[in-house]
Amino acid sequence: MDGASVTRTEELEEVREMAVETDHLRALELERRVTTWIEDEARILDDAKFEEWELLWETDGEYWVPQDRAHDDPERHVSLIYDDRDAITRRVDRLSGRLAYALQPAAEVTRMVGNIRIVGFVDDLIAVESRFMLVMFRREHTNVLGGRMRHHLRERPDGYGMVLKRVDLVGAGATFENFTVLF
Amino acid sequence: MITDVETTQPEIPYAELVLPDRVNSRVYTDEAIFADELEKIWHKDWLYIGHESEVAKAGDYVARRMGRQPVVLARGVDNKVRVLMNRCPHRGNTVCLEDSGNVDHFRCAYHGWMFNTDGTPKGVPYSLGYGKDFEKNDFSMSVVPRMEIYRGFVFASLSPTGIDLKAKLGRTAAYLDRFCDTAPEGEIDLSAGALKTRVHGNWKMVYENICDGYHPPFLHRSVFAAASRDGLVIGDAYGDQSLIVTRDLDNGHMMLDFTETNRLTGGPVFDIGGVVPPEAVQAHRAAVKARMGEEEGERILNDGLSNVSICPNLGLLYQDVRVIEPVSANETIIYNFPALLKGAPREINRARLYQEVRAYGPAGSVGPDDHEIYERNQSGFGATLNNWVVLKRGLERQYRDEDGTLVGNASDEVTQRAFWRQYLSMMTTAD
């Protein structure tokens, strides 16, 4: 075909295709960055780098491990964990301070995170759902725990900050022994 | 009397195992003693079952255990609560599968027998098969022989005879009053549910710990350290100069009495439930005084909350309603319910709920260290060369208070001795 006879319609069509491909590339890039971030958070927790984990929290952060998947109000029911930002700091202090007998010896733990999906946007936040399974060992006992997570992430210059981390454990309503790992 | 173990076994020499100032740790580890305790305590004594606020509407129910016996606390259409055995009178199936719920009627899944929420029969499918003399009204879910309620706290006993609840509660009734009168409507609310933790330790260690004023600065050092960082000075709260006292409330009940300290400071020893705005605190105080009168209201608010245990399975620790369920000699389940206050400002109840959640359960900053120490203790009991658990702390300095109660220093073992005296009595009293 003679290049000089490319029509306006065909030009517009080409621009439109490039725009779709750019959006598509942007979406893929976002998904890759978010997925890597979620996996990095898991690594930090596995390595018990709690002070580093605390830096990932925004000032309006909420950390919530409900007792039931159906619970939607931390003020109406007890939760396994419900921390505002101050309580997160206290929890990190306890986890990294070596004064807590329940955490001595510390547990060994490794977790897999997967099924990571950006499910939408809540105001300026990226809503991400994922699944995890962890295996932990402490004092002759090996234990497996797992569940689903929901993160609400706020963009930062160097990555993301957590505004919400909600962890719905498998068997959240069970009678657990001490939690010696963080989810 | 319900007997679980139908074997003849040698008599257990409790009088040699439980002495006035020491206890042989065999009582914490021996499964034969645990079986004996089920018979003589858990399937006989008054036990705390649940609170009326947990079954507020007709048809509401919660499933609980009395020792090993599964029961259901349910509110009938007549608005009365009952404690029913969770067992179908036909062939023994479990009727209530869920921990809690609301139903129009109970239905056994096996053969479809139906029961009203008061346990009486509602329907039996194909009842002609039982002949024309069949009377379905003979087949109810069994109701426990005794049930009484105090300030919404439902107690029950599997024994048809014994002292009444008022006699059982004894001196703890006055504290239950203070506990409930802290609510503007005079009622607490346990509908926020409970944290549940499984611990590898004997139930009696869990009970003893409710009013142990010796361990906090040592075992709970992470909390004391955090409080210091927050600017609170609680390091000496339990020391020799403490205003907190241990109190023997008779009948095996114990108290870690914070009244004098509360009159000075007016707040909990540590505060992780979040900031309560002063307006909410004032509104709460005003509401309590509106109900109780200025003077009585002021007294209740200033005397504040303490730790009280009601033998054998209930503890009130500030806002925590703690229920103990024995599983075996070395396993126990602990339930922690936050007591919310009916009529209190939202900020007050939110703080109480979050205080509970952040302190107790498997991920709290207080409970888990206790749970860990029970497990280490149970493990230590495996060394039996010297089996004595020494409980003589404060024997030289305990004294009778004006109200007749035996009192000791915050860190003294007056409270543990109070429990063991009752335990010996319960385990050796002929029926």
Image: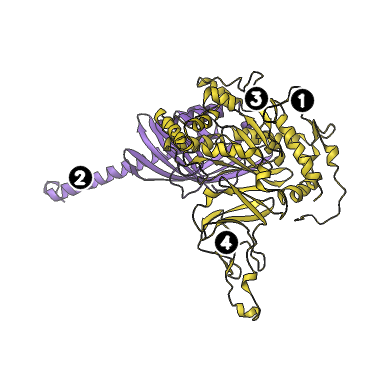
Chain colours: A purple, B yellow
Question: Mark 3 belongs to which amino acid?
Answer: Phe
Residue at which label 2 appears: A15
> Considering depth in this image, is A158 or B124 the residue closer to the camera?
B124
Q: CA distance from mark 1 to mark 3?
A: 22 Å
Q: Chain of mark 4?
A: B
Q: Whole-percent x and y of residue B60?
A: 52, 56
- Whether discs 1 and 4 lie on one chain: the answer is yes
Residue found at x 63% / y 35%: B308
Front disc: 1 or 3: 1
Q: CA distance from mark 3 to mark 2?
A: 71 Å
Which disc is residue B395 wearing? 1
Q: Secondary structure at mark 2?
A: helix
Question: Mark 4 belongs to which amino acid?
Answer: Asp
- Whether discs 3 and 4 lie on one chain: the answer is yes
For disc 1, the neighbor class at 10 Å (few under 14, some 14 to 19, many from 20) is some
Residue at which label 3 appears: B218
Q: Chain of mark 1?
A: B
Whether label 1 touches label 4, CB < 8 Å: no
Residue B381 in which image quadrant: top right
Front disc: 4 or 2: 4
Residue A37 in which image quadrant: top left
Residue found at x 53% / y 32%: B300
Q: Secondary structure at mark 3?
A: helix
Q: CA distance from mark 4 to mark 2?
A: 74 Å
Q: Whole-percent x and y of residue B236?
A: 61, 19
Q: Whole-percent x and y of residue B277?
A: 41, 29
Q: CA distance from mark 1 to mark 4?
A: 50 Å
Is B245 rendered above or below residue B46? above
Can residue A57 be spotted in the picture?
no
Q: Chain of mark 2?
A: A
Residue at which label 4 appears: B118
Front disc: 1 or 2: 1
